[in-house]
Amino acid sequence: MTKQTWAYFGLLVANIAWGAGASVSKATMAVFPPALLSALQIAIASVVMLAIQWRGKYPAIQPQDRWPMAGLSVVMNVAGFILGYVGIALSLASDISLLVIGEVIFTAFLARWLLREQIHRARWISIAIGAVGAVILITGSVGHNTSSAPNRVLGDILFLLDLLCCAYYTVRGGVFLARNNTVSMMTYVNVVSMIFWGPVLIYYIVSGQFPAVTTASILGLLYQSLVTSVLCIFLSFYAVKVIGATATTIVLFVQPLVGAFIGVLILGDPITSSRIVGALFVFGSICLSMRAQLREAQI
């Protein structure tokens, strides 16, 4: 297979794993609160990436990129994690999965702004449809809170802000990848964020607030740490390097499909008319975006 084919295959795997991530996180946070889950996840991912970095003897980050990449670490691994996990805790897993359309929208705008990538008419239409879908999903959750989703509107909004951080990380990270090794960049971003998460982890241990763990919570933590924070990010960065930041959105439809399936059939999330309509807009937007991407690739 060509590099482009491997890149798309890797993206497919990553999006399937990310699609299940909201449900896994929701279940794991029954034991680990958002801040502790974030600290543990980043700590485990950092140790793994440091081992890979040491074993592979990958080159150090370019000196001129170290401070900007430290800022990137704060955006994604601190702000993004806080917004994302608090959002998941407040909302339903299926809501969160469908709102991935926000990443498509934010990535397109940031790629246009930072990388000067063109947004053609078909993609503008897909962005508008996706935005309508997101509005329907959020407004449709008003007054429909549950014990497992105590504030769906706030949770959905916070998760959209997390997706903005993710989109910035993807687009801006693509610029740094042109000059730095993927493993080196992932290691650096994870380790730098431990400046914040290290004290959080120490606090939970010293204060005696570290919870009693279960087998399920450990498996969930390892899934989030090793699969979504290491494997998926590596596959995503590889794809950005090979096919570009905007093209990585072409298989994003897998995330809401997998996430909504798990949320509804396994976690028992309710099916409402607003969710059905919002989901149709989301999938319509992603399909139009995919079509536009394929047509632009042929030009």
Image: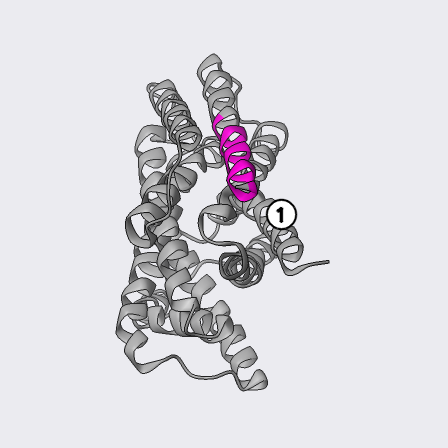
Task: Give the magenta part as a residue range.
Answer: 285-298
| Residue 23 visible, this angle | no
Element on which disc 1 rests: helix
Q: Which residue lies furthest to the front in this view?
A: 299
* The one of 114 and 33 positioned closer to us in this rendering: 114
Spot occupied by residue 90 in the image (x, y as percentages of width and height): 37, 37
Locate the N terminus and report the quarter of the image it occupies: bottom right
Disc 1 marks a residue whose amino acid type is Leu
State the residue at coordinates (31%, 74%): 65
* The one of 30 and 229 positioned closer to us in this rendering: 229
Q: Which residue lies furthest to the top in this view?
A: 273
Spot occupied by residue 186 in the image (x, y as percentages of width and height): 45, 69
Prevailing secondary structure class for the magenta stretch in the rendered image: helix
State the residue at coordinates (61%, 31%): 261
Q: Is residue 41 left or right of residue 71?
A: right
- How packed mark 1 is, by other alpha carbons closer than 10 Å (few <14, some 14-19, many 20 or more), is many
Spot occupied by residue 293 in the image (x, y as percentages of width and height): 51, 39
* The one of 67 and 212 positioned closer to us in this rendering: 67
State the residue at coordinates (36%, 34%): 156
Spot occupied by residue 34 in the image (x, y as percentages of width and height): 39, 51
User: How many dots with numbers?
Assistant: 1
Q: Which quarter of the figure has residue 61?
A: bottom left
| Residue 170 visible, this angle | yes
Q: Is residue 172 left or right of residue 22?
A: left
Q: Is residue 107 magenta?
A: no
Q: Name the residue under label 1.
A: 12
Q: Which quarter of the figure has residue 176?
A: bottom left
